Amino acid sequence: MKGYIVMNNYQICTKCIMDTTDPDITFDSNGVCNHCHVYDTKVALFGYKKDISDKKLADLVSKIKDESKNKEYDCILGISGGVDSAYMAYLTNQLGLRVLAVHVDAGWNSEVAVQNIQKMCQKLKIDLHTIVIDWPTMKEIQRAYMFSGLPNLDVPQDHVFLAAMYQYAKRYKIKYMLNGSNLATEGILPKTWGYTSVDFKSIKGVYKKCGRGKSIKKYPHFNIVQYYIYQRKVKRINLLNYVPYSKKEAIDVLSKEYDWNYYGGKHFESRFTKFFQSYYLPQKFGYDKKRAHLSSLIVGGELNRPDALSQMEDDSIYTINEMIQDRDYILKKLEITLEDWDTIMKQDAKTEDDYPSNKAIINIMVKVKRILKKLR
Ligand SMILES: [Zn+2]
């Protein structure tokens, strides 16, 4: 990003709504941020292009079907009850793929999310497996994360979701996993606002330092070697990048055809994620992931900038009263007192580097993967 000027004072992008709450943000001479530029590059590489993407998808689907013809399923799909995964379930039906849907209940699903999943799978005649994670174990790990000072409190949930998916893929010998990552709703996300959830060493490290020393053996997980093997055996497909994905249209189709209910915000299908992203992150770390999500919708052409700015200011989407109710519910469930909560909010912020991790190995793996992709 040569020639970009880093600003120390507050600045907001003139195209999207990303701002200096991302410490690494840079702006060009027109005030357009680095994320907007990176997004353009990503769209050129992975975005939907009518004839090319349609052909690629058709070829991919026939390859998947061909390779799975002697198996019970063509692919596996993690279904959360949110828009992206529900729309992927709908797409698999359109594409004639035999899908095994896996839903992981880590203790925080909203009623609406669970109903959405059941309605969708019944109507689409999709086999659904629901995995309920041992709550006492999940509670201990999530509780430790609350005391960790780390920004991403969703790591224990995200890891367990992926671990469950890989275990099922292995059990049914499934070679393709449909993944919800997409440019339309997630095209923009600063590096410093997230940490990979594939690193069990980091989870163990956090638990050792901040947990209550109980057994976490019942926590489904994978280590770095297993992750490497899984990655080789199960190919992850970002299905939504192969279609002209629009969140608005997806919600429309899902509600009309499947009586599916929208729950009001990205990742609001989980009560825990909703609270941590809307309260904990902005209050403790000074950034709001909603800003990145709305920016993705702007650059994707789904939302205009003034509407995004007013959504950022709109307190009625998640009121203070609802937030307090959620906070009290979460603290009670995790056995954390209000005094402890006060300490959590006041203590120094930490990063993953403050705990043991496999960050260096994972970074190398990512680099090698990128090089191999280029060589192909
Ligand atoms: Zn921008």
Image (spheres, rainbow, N blue to C red):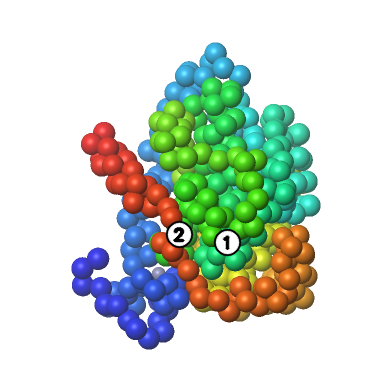
Residue found at the far front of this picture: 213
* Image mark count: 2
**Image coordinates for residue 164, horizontal then vertical, percent:** 60, 37
Say what amino acid the circle numbered 1 marks: Cys
The answer to which image quadrant residue 325 occupies is bottom right
- Residue 310 shows up from this direction: no
Q: Which mark is residue 21?
A: none
Determine the secondary structure under disc 2.
loop
Residue found at the far top of this picture: 70
- Compared across the picture, whether 108 is left or right of 364 comes to right
Say what amino acid the circle numbered 2 marks: Tyr
Residue found at the far left of this picture: 2
**Image coordinates for residue 39, horizontal then vertical, percent:** 38, 59
Residue 215, above or below 62:
below
Task: Kindly report the distance in space between the C-alpha atoms of the residues bearing marks 2 and 1.
Answer: 10 Å
**Image coordinates for residue 115, horizontal then vertical, percent:** 78, 46
Point out the image quarter for the C terminus: top left
Determine the secondary structure under disc 1.
helix
Identify which residue is drawn at 70% across, 77% down.
Answer: 339
Q: Which mark is residue 210?
A: 1
- Compared across the picture, whether 50 is left or right of 278 comes to left
Identify which residue is drawn at 23% across, 36% down.
Answer: 375
Identify which residue is drawn at 70% across, 33% down.
Answer: 128
Neighbourhood count class around disc 2 (C-alpha, 10 Å): few under 14, some 14–19, many 20 upward? some
Closer to the camera in the image, 252 or 290: 290
Residue designated by label 2: 355
Identify which residue is drawn at 71% across, 67% down.
Answer: 336
**Image coordinates for residue 328, horizontal then vertical, percent:** 76, 69
Residue 107, above or below 127:
below
